């Protein structure tokens, strides 16, 4: 399975998991030149920007390790752009979640980190 296909499979599993947890999915694979937001969703009155990391092996480390400060800053910039382009979305708080789809375990494990990191304050809401 190639990397893109693996990522899409993981994002699909994450979407199903989040919907089962009561999240309303607003966008998937929201792309701009500078990157992509995997999932944007509402959980109650919280707007969550959700990064999904899928691992079939640990050759590149655990998924959690890949959300470094550079990646966090990129996600924050993309989130601000999403907010700028979607002023109609009502929310009280905004956060960044990370969902790890760990296929190194059997059965596959899903780890969900709410409020996984705190970038600079975002406008909106």
Image: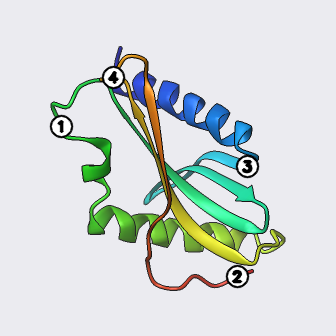
**Picture residue at 70% right of the left edge, 82% below the top:** 124
- Say the numbered circle drawn on residue 124: 2
Q: Do the residues labelled 2 and 4 touch (CB within 8 Å)?
A: no
Q: Which tag, 2 or 1, sits closer to the chain's start?
A: 1
In the rendered image, the vertical position of residue 35 relative to residue 84, given as above or below: above
Mark 3 closeness class: few <14, some 14–19, many ≥20 residues within 10 Å: some
Measured Cα–Cα span from mark 2 to mark 1:
36 Å
Give the residue at mark 1: 60
Q: Which tag, 3 or 2, sits closer to the chain's start?
A: 3
Give the residue at mark 4: 105
Instruction: Tell me: 71 left or right of 35.
Output: left
Task: Please tell me whether mark 4 sits on a helix, a strand or a loop.
Answer: loop
Give the residue at mark 3: 23
Instruction: Tell me: 43 left or right of 32.
Output: right
The extreme left residue here reads 59
Task: Please tell me whether mark 2 sits on a helix, a strand or a loop.
Answer: loop
**Picture residue at 79% right of the left edge, 62% below the top:** 44
Measured Cα–Cα span from mark 3 to mark 1:
30 Å
Measured Cα–Cα span from mark 4 to mark 3:
25 Å
């Amino acid at each position: 399975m190639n990397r893109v296909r693996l990522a899409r499979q993981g994002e699909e599993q994450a979407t199903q998991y989040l919907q089962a947890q009561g999240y309303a999915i607003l966008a998937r694979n929201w792309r701009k030149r500078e990157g992509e937001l995997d999932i944007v969703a509402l959980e109650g009155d919280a707007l969550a920007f959700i990064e999904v990391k899928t691992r079939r092996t640990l050759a590149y480390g655990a998924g959690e390790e890949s959300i470094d400060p550079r990646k966090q800053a990129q996600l924050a910039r993309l989130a601000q752009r999403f907010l700028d382009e979607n002023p109609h979305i009502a929310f009280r708080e905004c956060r960044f979640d990370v969902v790890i789809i760990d296929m190194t375990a059997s059965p596959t494990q899903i780890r969900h980190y709410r409020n996984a990191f705190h970038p600079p304050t975002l406008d909106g809401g």
